[in-house]
């Protein structure tokens, strides 16, 4: 297929490190796309497992496998992949995630609208909990929702493995920030900078399986705290303005820290939930803060069961929305 305005080449960036267990499924899901004008660029951060053996099994001219010296910085790995991309558009797929066959085909239909800077999709979350949790960031009568900078600050709707962005836009904002403090949240920071140029559209169709790992709550607490560094950067850049907007951003961080403390033995999370309650003026966020506070003062065993029950309710609500 020759590249033109109707069938532009898509460069799929797949960063990986010791994900030999999953990467075969990720590659298969790309090769099985109904849209075929694409290249796959796997950037290996010098894995020590069987990743290279798995990838060597795929004899496909669309696949490029690049190994770089280990850095442990996902932003650096992704930026290297982008520098090697030849496509008009960049799509991302983490090595432990997977796509539905029509994902790219469905997304490309929306790029005719000039105000859009990126198109993502909703996701089905694969987690340690014994069910698949569905997201609803794109659910609406229109079949999608559009998000600007202010709405992304409040709640990040963009899953990296779902998004497609024009390469020239990523280059215009100078790619991912390789600051080590932004490790694991470098994608969120990039989406915020890109959102200064236009809106992200999230399709209501759940076209990816997105894997989440819940076994490192202390690590996740550190990541949540580092999100505050993103907000400080954006205040310096002049993107995040006004005390009310800053307060809501900080409340988002406090809720995230409080949530991750729910998986620890202590009760430190209650202080962050109280902080979020005081910082936010939004009714929904205050309710989450109060529920989180009540959970955080319970013993861990009871807390875990109550948290699981809330997830079950969340699943039931999501299902009822699907059939209404």
Image (cartoon, rainbow, N blue to C red):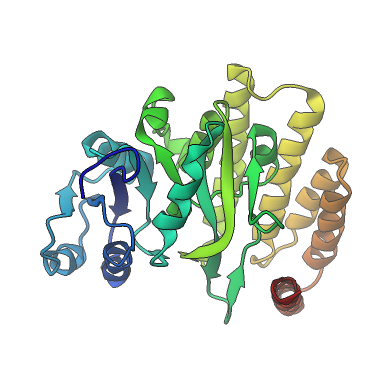
Residue 13, position as x, y percentages in the image: 31, 48
Is residue 179 positioned above or below 24 on the image?
Answer: above
Location of the C terminus by quadrant is: bottom right
Is residue 59 positioned above or below 302 on the image?
Answer: above
Is residue 70 positioned above or below 79 on the image?
Answer: below
**For this rendering, which residue is in front, 278 or 109?**
109
Instruction: Say if residue 3 shows up in the picture.
Output: yes
Query: What residue is drawn where x is 49% and y is 35%?
Result: 190
Which image quadrant for residue 164?
top left
Query: What residue is drawn where x is 41% and y is 63%?
Result: 102
**For this rendering, which residue is in front, 184 or 87?**
87
Query: What residue is drawn where x is 28% and y is 44%?
Result: 9
**For this rendering, which residue is in front, 317 or 39?**
39
Query: What residue is drawn where x is 57% and y is 25%?
Result: 233
Q: Is residue 73 shown left or right of residue 322?
A: left
Is residue 67 positioned above or below 99 on the image?
Answer: above
Q: Is residue 303 shown left or right of residue 166?
A: right
Q: Is residue 69 shown left or right of residue 323?
A: left
Instruction: Say if residue 212 shows up in the picture.
Output: no
Residue 257, position as x, y percentages in the image: 67, 51
Number of labels in the image equals 0
């Amino acid at each position: 297929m020759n590249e033109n305005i109707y069938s532009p080449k898509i460069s799929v960036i797949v960063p990986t490190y010791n994900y030999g267990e999953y990467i075969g499924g990720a590659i298969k899901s790309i090769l099985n796309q109904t849209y075929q004008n694409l290249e796959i660029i796997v950037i290996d951060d010098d894995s020590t497992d069987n990743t290279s053996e798995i990838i060597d099994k795929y004899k496909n001219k669309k696949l490029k496998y690049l190994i770089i010296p280990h850095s442990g910085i996902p932003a650096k790995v992704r930026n290297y992949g982008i520098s090697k991309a030849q496509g008009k558009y960049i799509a991302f797929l983490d090595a432990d995630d997977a796509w539905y066959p029509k994902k790219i085909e469905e997304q490309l239909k929306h790029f005719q609208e000039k105000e859009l800077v990126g198109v993502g999709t909703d996701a089905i979350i694969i987690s340690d909990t014994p069910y698949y949790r569905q997201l609803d960031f794109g659910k609406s009568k229109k079949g999608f929702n559009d998000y600007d900078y202010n709405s992304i600050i409040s709640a990040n709707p963009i899953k990296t493995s779902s998004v497609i962005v024009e390469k020239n836009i990523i280059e215009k904002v100078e790619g991912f920030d390789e600051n080590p403090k932004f490790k694991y949240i470098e994608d969120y920071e990039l989406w915020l900078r890109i959102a200064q140029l236009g809106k992200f559209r999230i399709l209501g169709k759940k076209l990816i399986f997105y894997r989440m790992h819940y076994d490192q709550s202390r690590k996740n607490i550190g990541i949540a705290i580092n999100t505050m560094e993103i907000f400080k950067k954006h205040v310096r850049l002049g993107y995040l303005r006004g005390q009310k907007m800053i307060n809501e951003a900080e409340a988002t961080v406090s809720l995230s820290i409080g949530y991750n403390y729910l998986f620890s033995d202590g009760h430190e999370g209650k202080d962050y939930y109280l902080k979020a309650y005081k910082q936010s003026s939004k009714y929904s966020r205050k309710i989450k803060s109060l529920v989180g506070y009540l959970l955080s003062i319970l013993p861990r065993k009871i807390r875990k069961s109550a948290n699981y029950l809330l997830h079950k309710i969340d699943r039931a609500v999501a299902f009822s929305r699907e059939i209404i």
